[in-house]
Amino acid sequence: MSDRTFHHTVRVPYADTDAMGVVYYANYLVYFEMARSELLREAGIPYGRLEAEGLFLPVIEAHCEYRRPARYEDLLEIRTRCTELRRARLRMDYEIFRGDERIAAGYTWHACVSPQGRARRPGAMLADLFKGEDT
Amino acid sequence: MSDRTFHHTVRVPYADTDAMGVVYYANYLVYFEMARSELLREAGIPYGRLEAEGLFLPVIEAHCEYRRPARYEDLLEIRTRCTELRRARLRMDYEIFRGDERIAAGYTWHACVSPQGRARRPGAMLADLFKGEDT
Amino acid sequence: MSDRTFHHTVRVPYADTDAMGVVYYANYLVYFEMARSELLREAGIPYGRLEAEGLFLPVIEAHCEYRRPARYEDLLEIRTRCTELRRARLRMDYEIFRGDERIAAGYTWHACVSPQGRARRPGAMLADLFKGEDT
Amino acid sequence: MSDRTFHHTVRVPYADTDAMGVVYYANYLVYFEMARSELLREAGIPYGRLEAEGLFLPVIEAHCEYRRPARYEDLLEIRTRCTELRRARLRMDYEIFRGDERIAAGYTWHACVSPQGRARRPGAMLADLFKGEDT
């Protein structure tokens, strides 16, 4: 749906590794969130502002596939796209790379809700996520 | 595949909440892991011993659906079953309850590998996970 | 100041370990918080209720000394006492044991503040923390 | 002892906040670690290489004072210096700023040990940390 892919890099801290010597699996969802926040910030609609304007985007579904282990000090690139925007839901897709190697891939589904938790249409607020960069 | 469901309870610490006032989404994967570890421990095959015997079970896929928010001090029950055991893979399914309310549900797929990362059959080591409790 | 020591046990999840194979140092502060929350709950004044009544206890200082590494699946006991209660501050002390071995020890200082962040005296609300069990 | 102060910036992710709406206190120790890793990397002795050469620097003491809350999306600057180097110990000091505001300050003490956990002198390996930038 969107041509617009955002790139965000993360340096793996020791905190994120586990006794297997690799990044603990739950931390990829944190990297997804960092990339998602960065995407919104770069699109000119930082998530904090969305919340201030009464639009919350809680995660209702998350998925991740782990291809190769990431390790301490790795420089990971997370590529993020908003791939679907429905009435009161949206989907983000993520791919994590270390150089040319694909480490992991996944997606999140978000509800669009008011502070009271009622479904609301994001409307124009999120439109920028779907504008292709060269159009 | 297995009749055997394990129950594990977690009290939500402040650490696991976020600025929305609810449990941050990645932490559910930590609850899954705690429940999974407990399942193996109760089945008499603690994960640490599996590793010592050369069987690692890295997560290769994780999925979670979030139904209702969990909050600080909630007492959550995680119900876990090993639902598939293939050559060198296994799947665990999880449901998280607060009282009668279903908070979240998900699954993880694990590879069965040697310390060098080669696929290996878990064989008898994991057989206990699939014995129904009354059979 | 208080004779009353509370005991709380934590089973170390894989999530809390790092590539050195031991519990990552920041996680001890999470164990402190779990023990502190449990202390308040057992004393009949769960922290959630304190917040609801307008008393927040943000950490203003934290300290930890690490004696021996803790590892995955270790069963740790955290012993907690409220050791000082001043006008609008209190101090908690913690010791972490694995069996008879002392793993770590530390303390936290907390401000007593209103929801607006103004200093307030906890007064009778926290008095129970300082009653010795047999007095 | 050292004139050399390193600067590292961190953007606060949602993951690091708690139900009080601010960065959870244990996460400052993670920021300290990120800054410490960056310091070693910039000094040309990345921690991963130190470990590969048989020098581990486990934390034996950590301390943090919290002055002002940090929040989601804040851009924090961590200023780090190696302030003491003894036989088989070293100390790092940290200050965290948001713009001109000092958010937090603290230190960590590290043992210098072999992979077997025996004390060893870091010797020339860490000497670069103590060279002032203009000397």
Image: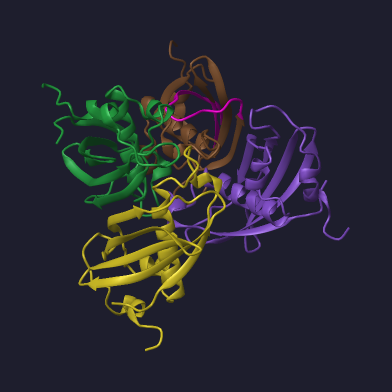
Chain colours: A purple, B brown, C green, D yellow
**Residue beneath the point at 33% across and 65% down:** D93
Q: The N terminus of chain D lies in which quarter of the figure? A: bottom left
Spot the residue most to the left. Answer: C135
Q: Is residue D133 visible?
A: yes
**Residue B39 screen position, x and y as percent:** 42, 27
C55 left or right, relative to B26: left
Q: In the figure, C45 relative to A28: above or below? A: above
Tell whether position B88 is magenta. Answer: yes
Q: Quadrant of residue B86 in the image?
A: top right
**Residue D88 screen position, x and y as percent:** 22, 69
Front-lying residue, C105 or C75: C105
Q: Main secondary structure of the magenta part?
A: strand
The stretch of residues the image draws in magenta is B66-94
**Residue D54 screen position, x and y as percent:** 32, 67
Spot the residue most to the bottom. Answer: D135
Q: In the figure, A40 relative to D40: above or below? A: above
Tell whether position B5 is magenta. Answer: no
Front-lying residue, A16 or C28: C28
**Residue beneath the point at 81% across and 43% down:** A124
**Residue C10 screen position, x and y as percent:** 32, 34
Q: Quadrant of residue C90 in the image?
A: top left
C22 left or right, relative to A79: left
Q: Is residue B86 visible?
A: no
**Residue beneath the point at 60% across and 29% down:** B66
Q: In the figure, B63 relative to D121: above or below? A: above
A101 left or right, relative to C105: right
Q: The C terminus of chain D lies in which quarter of the figure? A: bottom left
Front-lying residue, B70 or B45: B70
